[in-house]
Image (cartoon, rainbow, N blue to C red):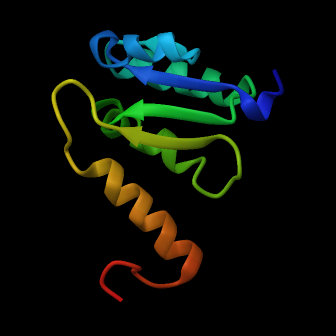
Amino acid sequence: MDSENKIAVLGDYDSIYGFASLGLSIFPVEGEEEAVKTLRNLANSGYGIIYITEEMGVICSKQIAKYNDVMTPAIIQIPGVKGNTGDGIMAVRRSVEKAVGSDILFG
């Protein structure tokens, strides 16, 4: 599999274990230190897309910001078992605003 095609899912085990049945590589983590270290390792290991639970996204926000201006990896926040915080959709919205120069939802 080409590195651009490698997809990882990072978060708490209960939120991500189902992604393994889709053929995605899962990386369950607990705590800030392990989450940041794992995210850094995934980004440096050629993963093209890294899905991260919103809860872990908050914990890893400084690390994620380092990858905002590069094509890969694309780091996309997803809801976890605790529900949707709205952080994931806001991150996508900011990316779109940056790309097109305006808020596509509210003009």
Residue 21 position, x and y percent, is 49, 10
The quarter in which the C terminus is drawn is bottom left
Among all residues in the image, which is located at the extreme front? 22
Residue 85 position, x and y percent, is 19, 44
Among all residues in the image, which is located at the extreme left? 82
Between residue 7 and residue 59, name the one nearer to us. 7
* Residue shown at 58% from the left, 73% from the top: 99
* Residue shown at 60% from the left, 47% from the top: 67
> Which quadrant holds residue 94?
bottom left
Task: Indicate whether 79 appears above or below 97.
Answer: above
Among all residues in the image, which is located at the extreme right? 2
Among all residues in the image, which is located at the extreme bottom? 107
Task: Indicate whether 2 appears above or below 27.
Answer: below
Task: Indicate whether 73 appears above or below 35.
Answer: below
Left or right, 53 with respect to 10, comes to: left
The quarter in which the N terminus is drawn is top right
Left or right, 2 with respect to 81, comes to: right
Task: Indicate whether 69 appears above or below 8.
Answer: below
Q: How many tags in the picture?
A: 0
Residue 86 position, x and y percent, is 23, 51
Between residue 35 and residue 33, name the one nearer to us. 35
Residue 33 position, x and y percent, is 41, 18
* Residue shown at 40% from the left, 56% from the top: 91
